Image (cartoon, rainbow, N blue to C red):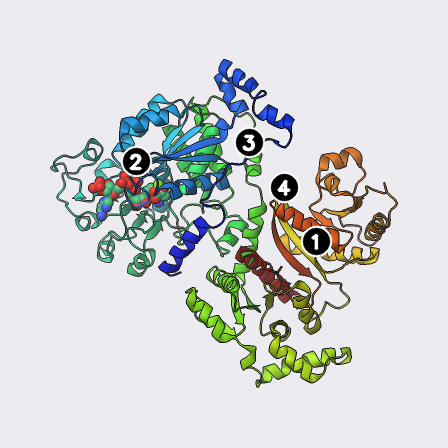
């Protein structure tokens, strides 16, 4: 992506919808007067009194135990320097987001407009009642050292300056593993640390704690090598001063084994890199741009292990791999601090995890099938779901063993299960779909390519390697929009049907349509006109003739008018019904709903056919075992109405014909989705004692209304409609879908096309 586009994209991302990246969400009911009288006055007085009597009860009655403050004064924001507290807020909110998604920790970001150490310490110290932990962030050296030291001494909750210790833990793990891979003895390696700030000083101390030798280390700051003869050296730098005859970075790196960059972009030149010892280790961690660009380093020499702070290259050495899990472990045992033992435990847990076989979902998320401990994988990936169990458990255990835990954990397996549960699965399912699409991207024809949203979605799926877009529409208009918004779509095929009318392909498409529809009142001339003027006919023909693998359309036209051409040109699989399904990403996990788009009032037989289609799709496309509830307004025969009887009849047919399918009904939606209610009242249900994850509606209106209600008031994300039963993979969007919805549909379409290949 060009830097101009990256900038626009980043600004749009942060400003779209509710500005910023985090919000506060109530966790207790608040709908009735009673709820409010408990949440606030008078009921709230009771927990207040309990806490006044026993301060530890704050962990029982308030959010303190899961709440971390990310606090900065903006003096060393990433590698951007002293940009001020307010300008640093997006980074602190970003950390809040990462704490939440990786470890389910809630965060208030606090930006303090002060550079005065005493004032900073006074304010943070006074925040102790609110928080379970304090993550100091992006505060420059040397003030950060005094701030952290004083807060640790004066506060009774864990305080950690992440740029110091988070970075030390991650890069310590990377260094241990890189040395092992290159068969270098950590106690012998010559290390150059470029940077002498918050991160560099603590990282260097950590390397010594894990085996490096002080006499083998040279440190530099912006003025060059830190030498003992330099005047006005502050104490933290003086500790690392050398007497050797080294002055510049070029002097220092010559014949060194390890380069640690915690300074600024592009300061390590190819010449310097070439002058390092054989098989060097280069951890260029400045953000957002490393001390030497990844591609440049790799083009310069190929015998090294290289890591950067960035997610777009192998070996991302970034503190995101540590802070969520370190705090998770510390909070869960109510540690009073994060001590050396806990940090070292985290280093070894991360280093160890890199040597374990990589779970399939991580391979898939990085579009590869062979991530394994080696030069391009020295530490785990930040999305590795095992980090929370491995690192948090190691940290919690170390806290208990070193005596700083105020709470103990008896059953570690149970704790691990709780940790896994914290990270719901619904995001995971879209990530897995992306990864599956990326493994074998397909040609997707976008029938409405002369549209801003379509082109943006096309750019995203191209950039992410999810699909090979084909843009269908008026070529001039498409090119105009591409230019206007600077979309990066070079090399993407544009097909303009109006320029194809004389081609053999066009004739082939028209012949096919005419053959299929001649006995349904369409003349050849009309077939030709439809092919020229309605792009949905042309796009469907491309898929039918294998000129594209799948199609996406429907953004600007009604559902029936978009689906009709596909039904006429491609049609249903032989003997199959066509139905539409939605996947709703809800707080309870993904729930599948059908039929939401096609069959207005199916008979019992048709309802059973739809259910068979849905069962197969959920199982095969999403790798989820469907537990299907056939919904009605009645429960297992409680009402003798027409709709309830129809649903009951469909269930009977399914139980006869598909004995292995987990399906039951007629049942009301609340019972279907609540296993306790279901089991208490209908213990005989064939849903195997679990809540349903797939809901079949008695007719189109109830299905369609239900998914829209879930979307609007249930805040569930809708992915679909996923069309089932077509002879070729075709996907029709809802009118005015968002870019995100289009991208999600492309992922589904590509996975669908992959399955179609297998069947062919
Ligand atoms: N990948 C990761 O996870 C992390 C990366 N970082 C990155 O590390 C860098 C430093 O952050 P932090 O320690 O918090 O910031 P600080 O402001 O505390 O320290 C910056 C240090 O870099 C030195 N420096 C600046 N320019 C150069 C140069 N050209 N050559 C040598 N040294 C230089 C400064 O020298 P002087 O003392 O003379 O001013 C100072 O010692 C940033 O780029 C940050 O993004 C930080 C934390 C985590
Ligand atoms: C990653 C990080 O904390 C930094 O670059 O400052
Ligand atoms: Mg930082």
Earlier in the chain: of badge 2 and badge 4, it is 2
Q: In which quadrant will I find the N terminus?
A: bottom left
Instruction: Please name the residue shown 50% across and 13% down the image.
Output: 53
Q: Nearer the viewer, mark 1 or mark 2?
A: 1
Earlier in the chain: of badge 3 and badge 4, it is 3
Residue at the far top: name it. 53
Res. 677 in view: yes
Return the residue at label 4.
Answer: 588
Return the residue at label 1.
Answer: 704
* Among the 4 quarters of the image, the one containing residue 692: top right
Q: Circle 2 sits in a helix, a strand or a loop, which is it? A: helix
Q: Circle 3 sits in a helix, a strand or a loop, which is it? A: helix
Q: Circle 4 sits in a helix, a strand or a loop, which is it? A: loop
In the rendered image, residue 602, in percent from the top left (x then y), is placed at 80, 58
Q: In which quadrant will I find the C terminus?
A: bottom right
Badge 4 local density, few (<14 within 10 Å), some, or many (20+)?
A: few
Q: Nearer the viewer, mark 2 or mark 4?
A: 4
- In whole angstroms, how far apart are the C-alphas of marks 1 and 3? 40 Å
Return the residue at label 3.
Answer: 415
Return the residue at label 2.
Answer: 202
């Amino acid at each position: 992506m060009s830097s101009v586009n990256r900038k626009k994209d980043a600004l749009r991302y942060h400003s779209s919808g509710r500005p910023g990246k985090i919000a506060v969400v109530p966790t207790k009911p608040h709908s009735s007067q009673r709820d409010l009288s408990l949440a606030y006055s008078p009921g709230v007085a009771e927990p207040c009194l309990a806490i006044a009597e026993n301060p530890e009860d704050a962990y029982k009655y308030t959010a303190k135990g899961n709440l971390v403050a990310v606090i900065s004064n903006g003096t060393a924001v990433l590698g951007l320097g002293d940009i001020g507290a307010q300008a640093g807020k997006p980074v602190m909110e970003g950390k809040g987001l990462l704490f939440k998604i990786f470890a389910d920790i809630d965060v208030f970001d606090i930006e303090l407009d002060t550079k005065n150490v005493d004032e900073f310490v006074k304010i943070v110290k006074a925040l102790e009642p609110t928080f379970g932990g304090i993550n100091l962030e992006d505060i420059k050296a040397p003030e950060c050292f005094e701030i952290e030291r004083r807060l640790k001494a004066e506060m009774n909750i864990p305080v950690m300056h992440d740029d110091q210790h988070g970075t030390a833990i991650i890069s310590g793990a990377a260094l241990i593993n890189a040395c092992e891979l290159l068969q270098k003895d950590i106690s012998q390696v010559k290390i150059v640390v470029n940077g002498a700030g918050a991160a560099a000083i603590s990282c260097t101390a950590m390397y010594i704690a894990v085996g490096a030798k002080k006499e083998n280390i040279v440190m530099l700051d912006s003025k060059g090598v830190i030498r003992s003869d330099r005047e006005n050296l502050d104490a933290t730098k003086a500790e690392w001063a050398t007497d050797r005859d080294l002055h510049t970075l070029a002097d220092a790196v010559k014949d060194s084994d390890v380069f640690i960059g915690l300074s600024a972009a592009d300061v390590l030149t190819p010449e310097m890199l070439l002058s390092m010892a054989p098989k060097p280790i280069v951890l260029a961690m400045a953000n957002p741009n490393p001390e030497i660009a990844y591609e440049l380093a790799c083009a310069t020499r190929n015998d090294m292990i290289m890591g950067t702070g960035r997610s777009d290259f192998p070996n991302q050495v970034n503190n995101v791999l540590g802070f969520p899990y370190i705090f998770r472990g510390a909070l869960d045992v109510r540690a009073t601090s994060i001590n050396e033992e806990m940090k070292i435990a985290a280093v070894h847990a991360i280093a160890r995890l890199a040597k374990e076989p990589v779970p399939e979902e991580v391979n898939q998320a990085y579009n590869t099938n062979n991530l394994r401990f080696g030069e391009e994988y020295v530490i785990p990936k930040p999305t590795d779901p095992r980090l929370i169990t491995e690192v948090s458990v190691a940290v919690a255990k170390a806290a208990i063993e070193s005596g700083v835990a105020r709470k103990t954990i008896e059953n570690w397996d149970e704790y691990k299960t709780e940790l896994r549960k914290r990270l719901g699965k619904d995001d995971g399912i879209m990530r897995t779909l992306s990864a599956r699409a990326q493994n074998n991207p397909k040609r997707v024809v976008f029938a409405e390519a002369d549209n801003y949203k379509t082109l943006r979605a096309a750019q995203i799926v191209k950039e992410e390697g999810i699909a090979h877009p084909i843009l269908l529409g008026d070529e001039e208009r498409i090119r105009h929009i591409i230019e206007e918004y600077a979309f990066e779509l070079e090399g993407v095929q544009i097909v303009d049907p109006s320029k194809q009318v004389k081609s053999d392909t066009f004739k082939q498409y028209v012949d096919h349509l005419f053959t299929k529809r001649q006995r349904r009142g369409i003349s050849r001339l009309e077939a030709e006109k439809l092919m020229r003027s309605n792009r949905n006919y042309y796009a469907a023909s491309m898929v039918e003739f294998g000129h594209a693998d799948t199609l996406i359309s429907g953004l600007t036209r009604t559902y029936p008018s978009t689906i009709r051409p596909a039904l006429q040109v491609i049609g249903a699989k032989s003997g199959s019904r066509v139905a539409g399904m939605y996947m709703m990403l809800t707080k309870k996990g993904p729930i599948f709903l059908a039929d939401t788009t096609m069959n207005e009032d199916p008979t019992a037989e048709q309802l059973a056919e739809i259910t068979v289609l849905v069962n197969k799709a959920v199982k095969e496309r999403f790798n989820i075992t469907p537990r299907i509830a056939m919904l009605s307004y009645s429960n297992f025969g409680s009402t003798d109405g027409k709709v309830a009887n129809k649903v009951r009849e469909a269930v009977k047919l399914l139980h006869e014909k598909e004995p292995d399918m987990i399906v039951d009904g007629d049942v009301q939606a609340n019972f279907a989705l609540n296993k306790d209610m279901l089991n208490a009242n209908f213990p005989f249900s064939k849903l195997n004692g679990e809540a349903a994850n797939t809901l079949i509606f008695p007719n189109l209106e109830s299905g369609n209304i239900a998914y829209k209600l879930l979307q609007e008031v249930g805040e569930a994300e809708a992915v679909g409609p996923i069309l089932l039963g077509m002879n070729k993979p075709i996907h029709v969007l809802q009118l005015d879908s968002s870019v995100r919805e289009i991208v999600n549909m492309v992922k589904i379409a590509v996975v669908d096309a992959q399955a179609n290949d297998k069947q062919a």
